Image: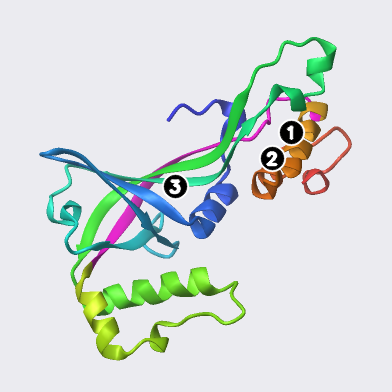
Amino acid sequence: MYVPAHFEADEATVRELLARHGAADLVTVTPQGLQATLLPFIYDPSAGENGSLLGHLARNNGQWKTPALGEALVIVRGPDAYVSPNWYASKAEHGRVVPTWNYLTAHVYGQLTVHDDPAWVEDVVRRLTGKHEAASPRPWSVDDAPRPFIDGQLRAIVGVELLITRVEAKAKLSQNRPPADVDGVIAGLRARGDDRSATAVAQARPARPGVTARGAR
């Protein structure tokens, strides 16, 4: 991944992205070519030296049956948004501005292991459910469904684990723009209703002179 120095994502940002993301693309190189599947993953920071990503595939999905050649890749995405030049204060000053796209992403590489084990898969399903139901006033639980039904569902999927070997991450969030332009981007995103992207830009902005990093965020 091309990552200019001013768009490098720090370790804390990467960990938060891996912990809070929704679904990500699992990409493997096989003798038949590239294969990819969009999957929800759970990040387990305690596994190995760099943590792991845990998920599951449909048993009928041939990707898990096809040996991966070398490392597998999971592409994790955070907020992303179109940025209009109209939001920049510098547009009125000199007009030398163009549209761009802001985004936060991580390319997570590692060794892929398949777990064709109902107990392992059920643990991942419960952890995924707990993560995504946490904000609900009445969270759904695996135990809400009849056990025979759950057993049947578990037989229809297999687990996958990416033991992370390295991460390349990029946070392109207007850090290269003057402070007034960053203010305009945040305001423009909020006016559009994209509070998630606006918050990401606000958190990534460089500290202003005389302002601590905490205060700038």
Q: For the N terminus, give its image quadrant.
A: top left
The residue under label 2 is 201
Give the amino acid type for the residue marked by disc 3 in the picture. Answer: Val
Could you tell me what secondary structure mostly forms the magenta stretch? strand
- Mark linked to residue 16: none
Query: Nearer the N terminus, badge 2 or badge 1?
Result: 1
Label 1 element class: helix
Residues at marks 1 and 3 touching, judged by CB atoms closer than 8 Å: no
The residue under label 3 is 76
Label 2 element class: helix
Percent position of residue 36, x then y: 27, 45
Is residue 48 among the parts visible in the rendering? no
Displayed quadrant of residue 79: top right
Give the amino acid type for the residue marked by disc 2 in the picture. Answer: Val
The residue under label 1 is 185
Q: Is residue 64 above or below residue 215?
A: below
Residue for point 83% across, 28% down: 180
Q: Is residue 117 magenta?
A: no
Query: Nearer the N terminus, badge 1 or badge 3?
Result: 3
Q: CA distance from mark 2 to mark 1?
A: 8 Å
Q: State which mark lies toward you, 1 or 3.
A: 1
- Closer-to-camera residue (130/193): 193
